[in-house]
Image (cartoon, rainbow, N blue to C red):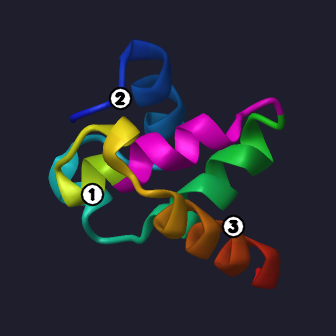
Amino acid sequence: MKNLGPESRKKLEEVGIFNYKDLLQFDSISVYVEVKKKFPDTSLNFLWALEGAIQNKDWRDITKSEKQNLLWILGEK
């Protein structure tokens, strides 16, 4: 999965996501929240990586506007 290295993949497996197809069944916020519950030290960079993976683009290409929107949604959960 794009943007997600071995450590990130281990975290995803802990919440039942084993491949890209599994990831696409969820939105980045939902996955981030579940991972953060199990791994409280998970940073926002993980959220950007998830969003990039779902959009099939480099996490650094997530725009400031997209990040702000994700943070707003995260604040609502």
Q: Residue at x 27, y 57 (%)?
A: 54
Foreground disc of the pair 3, 2: 3
Boundaries of the magenta span: 41-51
- Sequence-wise first label, 1 or 3: 1
Q: Tell me the residue that label 2 is attached to.
A: 4
- Sequence-wise first label, 3 or 2: 2
Quarter of the picture holding the N terminus: top left
Seen from the viewer's position, the closer of residues 34 and 63 is: 63
Quarter of the picture holding the C terminus: bottom right
Asked whether the residues under the numbered discs 3 and 2 touch, taking CB atoms below 8 Å apart as contact, a structural biologist would say no
Tell me the tag on residue 54.
Answer: 1
Compared across the picture, whether 47 is left or right of 10 comes to right
- Secondary structure under badge 2? loop
Q: Is residue 46 magenta?
A: yes
Residue 8, image x, y percentages: 47, 27
Q: Residue at x 54, y 32 (%)?
A: 11
Q: Amino acid at mark 2?
A: Leu
Residue 44, image x, y percentages: 66, 43
Compute the Cα span from label 1 to label 3. 17 Å
- Sequence-wise first label, 1 or 2: 2
